[in-house]
Amino acid sequence: MTIPFPAAVFFDHDGTLVDTEPLWARAKTEIAAEFGVTWSEEDTLACLGRPMVETLIRLQDLGIPLSREELLSRLTTDARNIVSRTDVPFLPGIQNLLDELARERIPAAIVTNATAEIATMTAGRAPEGLVHAVIGNEDVTEPKPDPQPYLMAAHRLGVDPTECVAVEDSPSGVTSAMAAGMKTVVVPGMQTVDADQGTVHLDHEQLSLEKFRDLFAPRPS
């Protein structure tokens, strides 16, 4: 039996599916202000796509007297509250791609270095039954840029990672997906991804199953 290509599509969350990066930045800014310190744009850019622990350490280095566990709980709660009262649409082109995947019964997963809770809220807005797994910071011992998150997602879906497509917007995410053996589509984000990173660079509006198959599907011999 021939499995249609792709076997699954894996998405980063913040900045790839939805523009939630500013909402996370707002949560960090508000926590910092509460303790009389400043979370800057430089801080935000330094932590984009990086393991969550780097954000927690950076907040502590600013002088916030909370443990990493306390900071993570506060950040998650504040981000959840902000997202729940904010209209956060899918980025251009994403809804059409999700609808295509649902019609062809190709499973999807979300793979993020942030907490799974916020990404799960986004998964709930995708076509019913499409998102089969959400892998977050709390699910792995080695976050992106290590391949573990994408390999774990592929394992949960029961698919060969080399037969899958990943959509990413950060250098660490691209490194993770490529190391897992996935065809990796790089979309524009807040960080610059070098032209030689990833399999191909596309705008969000160019994302489609037809494009993926034209670029990546095995050709009949």
Image (cartoon, rainbow, N blue to C red):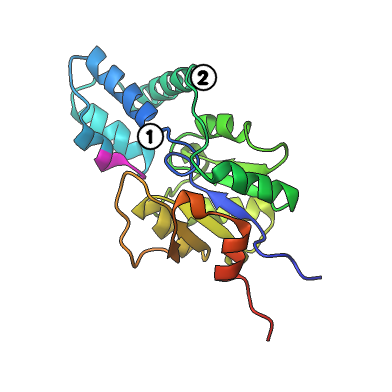
Residue to which mark 2 is pinned: 84
Residue 209 occupies quadrant: bottom right
Q: Secondary structure at mark 2?
A: helix
What is the crowding at mark 1: few (fewer than 14 residues within 10 Å), some, or many (at least 20)?
some
Three-letter code, disc 2: Ser
Q: Which residues are magenta?
A: 45-49
What is the crowding at mark 2: few (fewer than 14 residues within 10 Å), some, or many (at least 20)?
few
Q: Earlier in the sequence, mark 1 or mark 2?
A: 1
Q: Is residue 72 above or below residue 184?
A: above
- Residue 93 makes an appearance in the image: yes
Q: Secondary structure at mark 1?
A: helix
Question: What is the spatial separation of the Cα atoms under label 1 and label 2, in whole angstroms?
Answer: 15 Å
Image point (53%, 63%), residue name: 182
Q: Is residue 187 left or right of 159 when viewed as pictured? A: left
Three-letter code, disc 1: Glu
Residue to which mark 1 is pinned: 21
- Residue 65 makes an appearance in the image: no
Q: Is residue 111 above or below residue 57?
A: below
